[in-house]
Image (cartoon, rainbow, N blue to C red):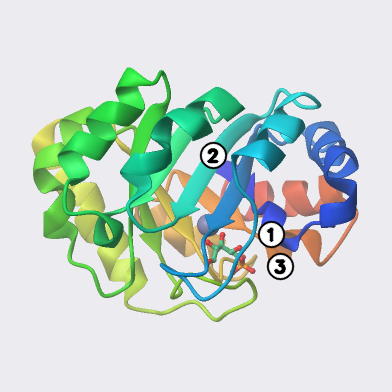
């Protein structure tokens, strides 16, 4: 299991220190939540802040774009140092073109689905996707409760990926805790995002160990 801590729950005034603390805790991925105040009712940061973080860290930058018409900004995020760019299926009418643009820009393409969005929208894209993100809360804020039906969605997506013969990773984001991480991994999740449950209980190396222990290492 890859744990991708959401920097949304980190101290924005000390991002370089927070990234260094993640690396020291054995973390490999950092989940960067980009929000535009339109697709979701909250605003965070964009390419300039990611470029500044890139200078201080070699973590894998897992960029979750909660923005309308993400196709407009793919090159900006790739140039800023995003390793993976995840766009919402609900945010564009041209999902295939946007995913192709991400690969063209040199980043790994991924698609996020809001809780109520059916899996069917990614079926034909699976061979070209590095990852599908199952949102298990309505995006916009950290610290919300996991929506239970999302567990079934993970199982169904796992079956769909197998059927397609694809190697697409499954990421789950929202309300992930020590109490539900094991069943998410058993259902097929490869990457778990955790914001409040991870940063809320330091020290981070101990927290990382606890998550990995619950999920079988
Ligand atoms: C929600 C974000 C999540 C969020 C997760 O819109 O996409 O990444 O920060 O936070 P927790 O783990 O607190 O639900
Ligand atoms: Zn996220």
Distance (Cα) linking label 3 and label 2: 17 Å
* The one of 150 and 159 positioned closer to us in this rendering: 150
At 81% from the left and 26% from the top, the residue drawn is: 56
Q: How crowded is mark 1: few (under 14 residues within 10 Å), some or many (20 or more)?
A: many
Tell me if 184 is positioned left or right of 216 in this view. Answer: left
Residue under pointer 3 = 196
At 75% from the left and 46% from the top, the residue drawn is: 209
User: Residue 146, image x and y in percent?
Assistant: 49, 76
Q: How crowded is mark 2: few (under 14 residues within 10 Å), some or many (20 or more)?
A: many
Residue under pointer 2 = 62
Q: Earlier in the sequence, mark 1 or mark 3?
A: 1
Question: Which of the numbered marks, if any, corresponds to residue 8?
Answer: 1
Mark 2 secondary-structure assignment: strand
Mark 1 secondary-structure assignment: helix
Question: Which of the numbered marks, if any, corresponds to residue 176?
Answer: none
Position of residue 141 relative to residue 111, above or below, is below
Distance (Cα) linking label 2 and label 1: 13 Å
Q: How crowded is mark 3: few (under 14 residues within 10 Å), some or many (20 or more)?
A: many
User: Residue 207, image x and y in percent?
Assistant: 79, 54
User: Residue 203, image x and y in percent?
Assistant: 90, 53
Mark 3 secondary-structure assignment: helix
């Amino acid at each position: 299991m890859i744990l991708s801590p959401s920097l949304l729950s980190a101290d924005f005034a000390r991002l370089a220190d927070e990234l260094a603390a993640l690396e020291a805790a054995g973390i490999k991925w950092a989940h960067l939540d980009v929000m535009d105040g339109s697709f979701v009712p909250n605003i965070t940061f964009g390419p300039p802040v990611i470029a500044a973080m890139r200078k201080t860290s070699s973590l894998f930058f897992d960029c979750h774009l909660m923005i309308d018409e993400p196709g407009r900004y793919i090159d900006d995020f790739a140039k800023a140092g995003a390793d993976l760019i995840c766009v919402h299926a609900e945010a564009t009418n041209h999902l295939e073109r946007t995913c192709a643009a991400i690969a063209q820009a040199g980043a790994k393409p991924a698609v996020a689905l809001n809780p109520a969005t059916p899996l069917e929208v990614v079926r034909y894209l699976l061979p070209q996707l590095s990852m599908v993100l199952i949102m298990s809360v309505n995006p916009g804020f950290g610290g919300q409760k996991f929506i239970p039906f999302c567990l079934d969605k993970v199982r169904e997506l796992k079956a769909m990926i197998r059927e397609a013969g694809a190697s697409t990773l499954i990421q789950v984001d929202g309300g992930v805790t020590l109490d539900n991480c094991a069943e998410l991994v058993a259902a097929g999740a490869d990457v778990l995002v955790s914001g409040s449950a991870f940063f809320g209980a330091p020290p981070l190396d101990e927290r990382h160990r606890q998550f990995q222990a619950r999920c079988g290492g």
